[in-house]
Image (cartoon, rainbow, N blue to C red):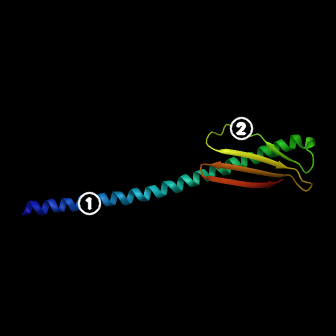
Amino acid sequence: MKNKKRKGAVLILVLTLISLIGIQTALLTMGSSTLLRRTNNDILTACDRNLAASASAWLKLNSARLAPDKSVDLDTTQLKNHSHKCSLKIQTTPAAPLISTFSQLGRQKQTRQHRL
């Protein structure tokens, strides 16, 4: 009789440990997906800032050659961003130039416009 009670107690202990491990795994998975999403967002924001700074520097050097009210698409294939896509467009307007940036990493997309 004692042996059956002991086996039952061990079984309950093992089932409890398995359920605790499952709960911890679920919590860690949710936490890691949140961190991954935030990291991807930070990568896209950094790409956006770099593109805007590059466009601003390019515009300072080439502003005399640009016709007013025209848009220029700058080639971003030379950036060698293997993990994400980037594009850059500069629109010259009489008020102030408009820089449009687009970044994509996986399913996350980010489009921003900057006025100089």
* Mark 1 residue type: Leu
Mark 1 surroundings: few (<14), some (14-19) or many (≥20) residues within 10 A: few
Residue in view at x 53 percent, y 54 percent:
35
19 over 59 or under it: above or below:
below
Residue in view at x 89 percent, y 53 percent:
93
Label 1: element kind: helix
* Mark 2 residue type: Thr
Residue in view at x 43 percent, y 59 percent:
27
Residue in view at x 49 percent, y 54 percent:
32
Q: Nearer the viewer, residue 79 or 50?
A: 79
Q: Nearer the viewer, residue 90 or 25?
A: 90
Residue 1: x and y in percent read 6, 63
Q: Which residue is mark 1?
A: 15
Q: Which residue is mark 2?
A: 77
Residue 94: x and y in percent read 92, 54
**Which sits earlier in the primary sequence, circle 2 or circle 1?**
1
Label 2: element kind: helix
Disc assigned to residue 115: none
Residue 96: x and y in percent read 88, 54
In the image, 68: left or right of 9? right
Q: In front of the other: label 2 or label 1? A: 2
Residue 109: x and y in percent read 65, 53
**CB under 8 Å between discs 2 and 1:** no
